[in-house]
Every structure is written in C-alpha cells, then in structure tokens.
Amino acid sequence: MAVTMHGDIISDHRERMLNLKKYYPFFKLTQISFSQFKDGRYEILDMGYILMAILRFFIEENNFKEKDVTYPKYLEFITDVLKKDFGLVLGEEESREIGDYIFDKIKNDGKPFDFQYFDPIDKKKRTSRVRIIESTVRNSTVWYSISPDAIEFYLDTKEIKDESRINVQQLLLEKMIRANNFKGGTEVVERINEEVNRLQLKKNEVMSIIASDVYAGIEAYEEFVDTGMKWFEDEEKLFRKNRDLIQAALEKIDKKGHGDSYFKTVNEIYELESQLKVAMNRHSELLKACTDMQKLTDEAVRKAKLGKLRAHVDFKNMLNDMIKTDRADILVQLVSPLFMPKVKKTFDITAIDNALENKPVKYQEAEKVSRQELTDIVFEDEVEEKRIRDNYVFLMDNILSALEVRNTFTLEEFNNAMKKLYSPDIVKNGDYYSFFVNLCQKKEYCIGGDGGNNESFLDEYVKEAFADKEPVTFSIGFNGNGKLALFDGCEVSDLVFVRG
C-alpha cells in the first residue's frame, strides 16, 4: 500500500504542479501593496480584486465581443473600477499613473511569471512559464488579449475542474429553463460560449506545440483529450435536450395567451434560443476542428516515427502485427534470404602479400572523444530583455555625450539631434520612449563609477554598463506644459536635462 502511494506521489506530481501553475500569478500579485505607491494615497486598493475585474473585462472583450483590447480601452475600464468600486474620483493624470502601475504589474514588466517546481522523476528543478496578458502589434497599434491559462484560472475559481464545465453549465441551464428564468439562462449560455472559446484557444495552443515539438505536442494533445474532448458526446446530447426544453417552453407560453408579460417572456425565450444556437454552432465547429487536429496529430506522429526508425527488426512486434492482420505470408520476406546463403567462398591471393606487409602497431591509440558544449536555450523574453538593455545603454550613452557638449538641453532638442545622427524613424521606436518613461521615475541621476542606486531595472542596466567611466550627475524636469507632437496620434511631454 505504501509503495503504491509513493508511486502515485511521484507520477502525479508534475501534473499537479502544472495545474497549480495558473494560480501562481494571482497569489504573486496579491502580495503587492499600494501602501508604498505615491506615499500610500491609494492604500485602499486591493490588487486581488482589481486583477479579477481585469480578467473579466478581457474575457468580455476577447471572448464575448471577439475583439482585442487597446491600452486606452483598458484605461477607461480601470478608471471606472477605481471610481465605482473604490470611490476614487481622480483626474486624468492620476488615473493614468495608477493604470500604468497596475498594468505593468499584471504584465510582470513584459516577462512571464516563472513557476518553479521539483520534478521527482528526473530529480531536478523545472521552470514553467505563464502569462496573464498577451500582446500583438498590428498596424502600429499594440493589441492586448487574455491568455488561455488566465481564462482557465478565472473559470476554475468558480467551477468544477474534474467535470466538463459545459456540462455543469448545461445542467444549470436546464434548471433555469424549468423555473422559467430565461434571462438567467441567457447568462449561463454566455458562460458556455466562453468555455467553448477557451477550448478553441487551448486547441490552437496544442497545434502550435505539435508544430514545434511533436513529443511535447503529444503530451499536450493527450491532456486536452482527457480534459476537453472526452465530454463532447455528452455535451451534444445536453445541447439538444435544452433546445427541446426551450421549444416546449415557447409552446407552453403560447397556450397561456397574450397577457401583459407575454411579450417580455417571449423576447427572453427568443434571446435564449438565439444564444443557444450560437453556442451549438461554435461547439460543432470546435468538434470539427478537434477531429481535424486528431488527423494532423496522427500524421505528425507517423512522420516522427518514420524519422526515428532503427536499423534492426523487432521480431516480437512483427509477430504481433502478423497475428493482428492474420497474414503469415509476411514471413516469406523475412525467411527467404536465409534459404539462399552464398556457400562458395573465395580468397584473393594478393591478400597474402597484404597480410605479410602489414605491421601491427606497438600500442593501441586511445579513441578521441570530441566534447561539444550544449548551447543554452534562449527564450523569447530573454531576447527581448537583451534588446531593451542594449537600447537603454545606447540612449544613456547619447545623453551623456550631449551633456559633455551642453550643460542643459530639452527633449525636443535631443530628439532632433538623434534624428539627424541616426534616422528620423528613431522616434517611432517603442524602446526609445519606454526608456524616458523609466528615466522620469527619478529626478536626479549619477551615472558612472559606483554612483546611483539599483532602484529599478534601468538603474541596474546603466550602472553595469558605465561602471568604468567617470561619474556624471544630471537632473530631469518638465519643460512647463510643453508638448511634443512626434507623428499622428503620438504626443509626449517635453523634458529638460541639466548637468549638475
């Protein structure tokens, strides 16, 4: 009994840790306190509540309305939350500061949350990564969407893991239809649509894994089959059952006549029926997509097996195949070469001379083994971090060079100089202005030598890069209410740099 229990602990540990992974960012973020932000003026704010509200907002926009979110749209929502839920009536600048701070924390400054756990099978530490918000750039605009892990986390906080979420919601829908709560039933169908969309995203994620790594993709595919596809048949039955219940409810309300509440009830039933049809269509599309995925997976596995064929015959598997196919004639191909051995042997007379002239070596040379160091795996976020670090050091080097020429200058003057030195498109680089956003977190800097403190990752970048140079001190201030128009739809505040 103890051996079985210990085996279960080892074999199930990795799956349990990966299931816990999606909860890790929430508890990591809830440790953030607003008491240190802006001298504690916003201490009333609770990051756990704000995170759940933002997840619900992204699910509404991404899954219900089927569109990605822009940053101004997010700011509009978070400002409304701060006002209605926390009673904070703030100006535009204050709302933006809080919104920026919260969004940076939820995005983890552009990096995924690293969830570390011990793998008892391989006996080593593993790191799994999870994001809450994902981003893409289209037509010079950054669009944000919620990740599949974040959707699953949000649903898991209220629903049952070991059962089909769609089945659970359909049972609830059946109860609401029987209780004539058609409006509440519509909300349940919206949650069903949300789950179908989550499974669609999960299916796409499995396909991307299969395209890059077949063996990891097989594990992801098997997990998806166990947690999603195995319920499809039951879900289809419940869809049809609830559709019939709606039709019965509509016939029943028609028999009662046209009272005051008749039209309201009929509209609610039609709305519920319309939403359920959308859910059934999406569910059918998902089922078809999963069937196609199964075919593609089988084809990918077949190709991978052909690429891994070994140069020997597995007689046991061959025997099993012959038994399954009931084809003993396959033995002919295996045995026929053994009945035609080459009995006649010949010996070339010149081989005697070669044998006499061959001198044996006095010692046996050791086999030379080449040692090749394994290259480290470079993740996408590490590439991004290196690019940001290099750009930040480059821009700080240009600021220090400008301070050697002039003791004071404005951001507008610096921009013009950079466009002349390098390219007019430099002002369209995202790292260019994220550098100044981070730079404005402090009013004074001491760059070079041992000066400065590591209060932010920007300080860490520049301190390491300029440690061998003479210290330069300068301060940063705003140039009144001056605004710089860079290109269409982009405007920033002007700054003043003064060497101290």
Image: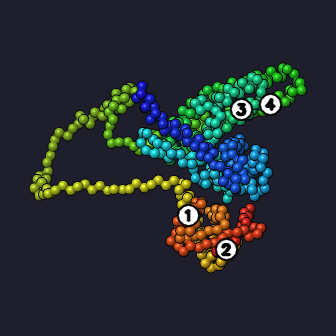
- Where is residue 126? Give x, y as percent: 47, 45
Q: Pointer 4: what residue?
A: 268
Q: Which residue sits at x=42%, y=27%?
A: 2
Pointers 4 and 3 in contact (C-beta within 8 Å): no
Label 2, label 4: how far apart the Cα atoms are: 66 Å
Does label 1 or label 4 sit earlier along the sequence?
Answer: 4
Q: Pointer 3: what residue?
A: 188
Q: Name the image quarter holding residue 121.
A: top left
Q: Residues within 10 Å of mark 1 (few under 14, many from 20)?
A: some
Label 1, label 3: how far apart the Cα atoms are: 50 Å
Which residue is situated farthest in the bottom direction here?
405
Q: Pointer 1: what residue?
A: 461
Mark 1 against mark 3, which lies toward the viewer?
1
Kind of residue sitting beneath label 3: Val
Pointers 1 and 3 in contact (C-beta within 8 Å): no
Does label 2 or label 3 sit earlier along the sequence?
Answer: 3
On screen, residue 472 versus residue 259, left or right, reads left
- How many labels were placed on the picture? 4
Mark 1 against mark 4, which lies toward the viewer?
1
Quadrant (top left, top right, bottom left, bottom right) of the C terminus: bottom right
Label 2, label 3: how far apart the Cα atoms are: 60 Å
- Where is residue 396? Give x, y as percent: 59, 69
Does label 1 or label 2 sit earlier along the sequence?
Answer: 1
Asked if residue 30 is positioned above or below residue 425 in the image, the reply reads above
Does label 1 or label 3 sit earlier along the sequence?
Answer: 3
Kind of residue sitting beneath label 1: Tyr
Task: Point out which mark residue 498 bears.
Answer: 2
On screen, residue 82 versus residue 471, left or right, reads right
Label 4, label 3: how far apart the Cα atoms are: 13 Å
